[in-house]
Image (cartoon, rainbow, N blue to C red):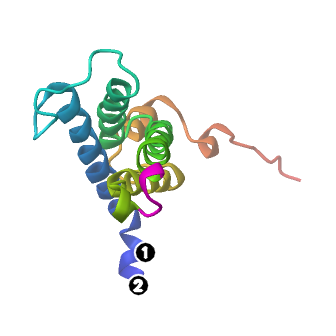
């Protein structure tokens, strides 16, 4: 198990990227009728909730994929999938296997996990902020006078 502990940050980073890519693909499919999308039935711009959900999927997925604003994007994405599940799927049947809400439920929990664990390795947000800020340990240099 020590090997798994050492690679935890890398696994979280890869997990974040895969979940973000898959979510962004759902948004692109809906908005641009690509990747097996809605086949000519794309929602009109601004239409509630379809168009907004697709925008959240595309933008949230892209941000999570890149690791920019990861936790915020993951919370918004998780919330949108919770909304989708409880408003559109759950009224039809109790369990996701029965109501077609498996993807919504899985994405909801996947993004909640990403929000809780953070971006892991290879996040652009971490790389961009690392150069601008100095760690607290380096800023707070305390000199103790000799007695």
Q: Residue at x 32, y 55 (%)?
A: 100
Residue placed under numbered mark 1 in the picture: 5
Residue 134, horizontal then vertical, whole percent: 54, 36
Which mark is drawn over residue 106?
none
Q: Residue at x 24, y 47 (%)?
A: 22
Magenta stretch, main secondary structure, is loop
Please name whichever residue, 46 or 79, is drawn nearer the observer in this view of the structure: 46
Q: Helix, strand or loop at disc 1?
A: helix
Q: Residue at x 33, y 35 (%)?
A: 57
User: Would you say the residues marked 2 and 1 are in contact, meaning their CB atoms lie under 8 Å apart?
Assistant: yes
Tell me which segment is drawn in magenta: 91-95
In space, the residues marked 2 and 1 are separated at their CA atoms by 6 Å
Residue found at the far right of this picture: 147
Residue placed under numbered mark 2 in the picture: 1
Horizontal placement of 78 versus 56: left or right? right
Residue 64, horizontal then vertical, whole percent: 36, 41
Please name whichever residue, 17 or 89, is drawn nearer the observer in this view of the structure: 89
Q: Residue at x 29, y 32 (%)?
A: 58
**Quarter of the view holding residue 27:** top left
Q: Would you call the spot at circle 1 few (<14 residues within 10 Å), some (14-19), or many (20 or more)?
A: few
Residue 19, horizontal then vertical, whole percent: 31, 51
């Amino acid at each position: 198990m020590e090997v798994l502990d050492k690679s935890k940050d890398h696994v979280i980073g890869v997990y974040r990227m895969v979940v973000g890519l898959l979510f962004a693909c759902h948004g692109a499919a809906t908005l641009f009728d690509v990747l097996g999308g809605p086949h000519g039935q794309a929602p009109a711009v601004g239409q509630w909730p379809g168009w907004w959900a697709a925008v959240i999927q595309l933008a949230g997925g892209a941000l999570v994929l890149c690791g920019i604003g990861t936790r915020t994007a993951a919370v918004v994405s998780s919330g949108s999938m919770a909304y989708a599940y409880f408003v559109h799927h759950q009224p039809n049947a109790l369990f996701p296997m029965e109501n077609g809400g498996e993807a919504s439920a899985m994405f909801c929990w996947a993004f909640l996990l990403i929000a809780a664990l953070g971006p892991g390795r290879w996040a652009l947000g971490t790389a961009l902020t690392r150069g601008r800020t100095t760690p607290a340990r380096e800023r707070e240099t305390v000199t103790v006078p000799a007695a």
